[in-house]
Structure formats: C-alpha cells, structure tokens
Amino acid sequence: MNSLDVYLSPCRSPGILSAKIWIRDGSRADPINKKGLHSLLGSLLIRGCGPYNNLQLADLVEGLGAVLLSETYEDGIMISLKCTEEGSNDLLPLLKWIILEPRLEKEQIDLERQLSIQAINRQKENQFIVALNKWKEIAYQNHPYSQEVIGSIKDLKTITRSDLTSISEKILSRQKVIVISGSLPANIDTYVKDLKVMNHNPNKKMGKSISDDFKKANNFNADKSIVITPQDTKQVVIILGSTTIPHSHPDDIALRILSCHLGSGMSSVLFNILREEKGLTYDVGIYYPVRELNAPFIIHASSSKDKAMETLILIRKCWNNLQYSLLSNEELKLAKSKFQYNYANNSQTISQRAERKAHLIGLNIDENYDLEILKLIDSITKEDIIRVSDLYLKWPILSLCGPENKLNQLRDFWIENYN
C-alpha cells in the first residue's frame, strides 16, 4: 500500500464535512523506556502546526465552529476534523500541516506531558482500568499490547522534544489514510492534490509490523492464569478473558456474534443471569475491541465483596459453557440481529462512516469489509460459535481488583478449579 491514500465519500449532509486521518502504528510502536511517546505526539499534532501556533490554531478552528481532535490507539493515531462546507476552505489545509509541520513547542509539550501524568494518576483510582491493565500485562506479556496507550509516568518524564521530533519525521514514511466525507466543496480536488505532497514514497510497500511475530500461547497453568491487585474498597472488579484474533480474521464475525449474545443489551446472557436473576453485579459486559493483531475478548463485571465469589463462579460457568453448549436457534437469531443493529447504529453519521473507513483501510482491510460481513451473517451456525470458542477462548486469564482478603479467597478458588 502507498504511504498515503486519500478517499472521498461525498454524501448528503446539512453542509457538514468530516475528515479523518489514520496514521499507522500507535502505542505499540513506542520505543523501550519511552512508553507514551505516540500518545503524547498525537496530542501535540493538533496543538500547533505549519503557520499556526497553539492559540492561532485554536482561534481558527473554534472561530469557524469546527472541531479538531486526536486520539491515539494501540495500532495508530486518528486525527478528526469536523467543519462546515464553507469553513473547509480554511480548515482542510490543516490536514497537510498537521503531518508535515507539527510545531511541537516546548510549552505545549510540557503541558500535554503534565495532562498525561494527571490522567495516569486518575486511572489508578479506577478499579476497572487497574484490573484491565494488569490483565493485559499477564495476557500479552512482552507484546506491545501489554502496555497502556497513555504510557507510564516514569517514561513520560524522560521524553524530550528530540524524541518527539524524530518520531514525527518517521510519520512521513508510514502508511497514512485520509477519508473526507459529507458535503464536499467544489474545489476538493485541489486539496487532494495538495495532500499528495505527503506521499513521499508512492511505490513503497508496507513492511511487516513490529508486532506481527506475536503468537498466542497454547495454554497456561493455573498459577500463571490469574493476577490480583489489592485495593481498600468494598467492591471487586473481575476481568476474565483471552487474547484472540485480528479483526481481519475470518473467525472474527463468529466471535462478534458471540459477544452480542453474551453482553449486548438487556436481553444478553450476562445481564440476565448476573443482574436480573441474581442481582450480583453493578455492571457486566463484553470488551472485544477492533485490533490489527490479537484482540482481547473479555468479560468484565463489578460486584460487592460479599457477592464476588458467586459472581466469579457464574462467570466461569458461562465462559466454560461456550466450548460445549450450543446456542438455541432463537438465541443465535437474536445475537445476529444485535450484530446488525450495532453496525447500523455505528454508521449513522458522516463522522462514524469516515472513521470506520479510515480505520479499516489503515488496518489493511478492504474498505467494503462491513458489507461483505453482513452478507455472511446468515451462514454462521451454532457449530461455528462452538468451534471459535474452543479455538480462542479455552484458556482464559483472570484479573481481580478489590479488598485483599476477598481476592485471596477468589484466587484459591480459581487455582483449584481452573481446569
């Protein structure tokens, strides 16, 4: 794939335009001892670029009623611009400046660094994030997905402007995708031609990702399948799951249908059993994000310490049932309907559609992937659900966060009953 691809998706909208830039490789490409480098860079890309310092850029964007945002993920950085068609003449040129000439001014670096450190400190008070991060450490081990996107306080303090400048220059040779959707201006071709100056290596093929060699272990022993994080609280957060497959894998659709069956809506299995029937949890659900490599498939729940044991027993039972208990015809039909609804719900706005397209192409997946998947839904059988469960969900890892005495009891139960 070329280092830059620009896609135009004109569609009817009330004079609104949405532009998305996906830059390949996010936190997974952070160098050793520089965790948080890409997250910090992602924030700084929209804090001054080309002829605009931070205040000038903010005045330009806000003065035209537009929105400019940046989000860093494991697999890449997403820059989002939403504006009116009239304002696009002044704002679309920013897409080029953001990539070619980020300012990376010292005061902005110091500010964003401090904001990142504050966010990390806040995360330490969030039991779910604490438990999830510990789960990733043991599930992914030395894989780049094991680290938190925002990085670590220790590493953030060591990141210099030179580090940021070096990584921003490498963006020029990375795969980049730009999708512009909505009410496009009449002179959009002029902007596209201008953007092409970023395509320094039009014939360059993308090399293998730094993470492509990661392989999922075949099994785990019980002692290494659990991690506990004591906190002086009255509730227990339970994170149970496995690393699975990339979004592009043919089995992904079956896992997503399964995730809808388990955790989508008030009719889902987990909600009905753990909340409606037993009243055991404050919240419960499935976490199965889109990833270029091995995505996590996780059941998460929060329970009081008095009900934590019963909650874990039921979650473990639900998980084990996935390998041998067939869904009924009604359950499978409902799960597929939820899958289709989620797709439609996430494709309502021009911003959602542009982001999804940029994300897919940025992950080297065909832009028509979703349409092809929707055609395949009817072909997924109950036996397919069992097969993928046995392949990818057989050896789960458990992360617990809560009062130490209760965690020790839960750990003993887990180790005794793991197999």
Image: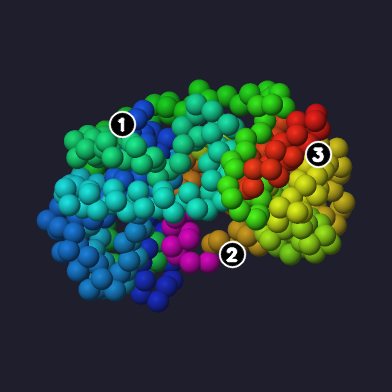
Label 2 vs 3, first from the N-terminus: 3
Residue for point 80% across, 30% down: 416
Question: Is residue 282 positioned above or below 153 on the image?
Answer: below
Report the residue marked by disc 2. Answer: 345
Q: CA gap, disc 3 to disc 1?
A: 49 Å
Give the x, y percent position of residue 86.
26, 73
Q: Read off the magenta span.
A: 348-357
Describe residue 341's horizontal placement relative to residue 206 as left or right. Answer: right
Label 2 vs 1, first from the N-terminus: 1
Q: Where's the C terminus, which quadrant?
A: top right
Residue for point 22% across, 48% down: 109
Callout 3: SS: helix
In this view of the protein, which residue sits in the foreground, 96 or 116?
116
Residue for point 54% across, 62% down: 347
Residue 412 seen in the figure: yes
Report the residue marked by disc 3. Answer: 320
Question: Is residue 239 positioned above or below 88 on the image?
Answer: above
Q: How many marks?
A: 3
Name the disc covering residue 407, or none.
Answer: none
Residue for point 51% across, 38% down: 292
Report the residue marked by disc 1. Answer: 203
Callout 2: SS: helix
Q: CA gap, disc 2 to disc 1?
A: 37 Å
Label 3 vs 1, first from the N-terminus: 1
Mark 2 belongs to which amino acid? Asn
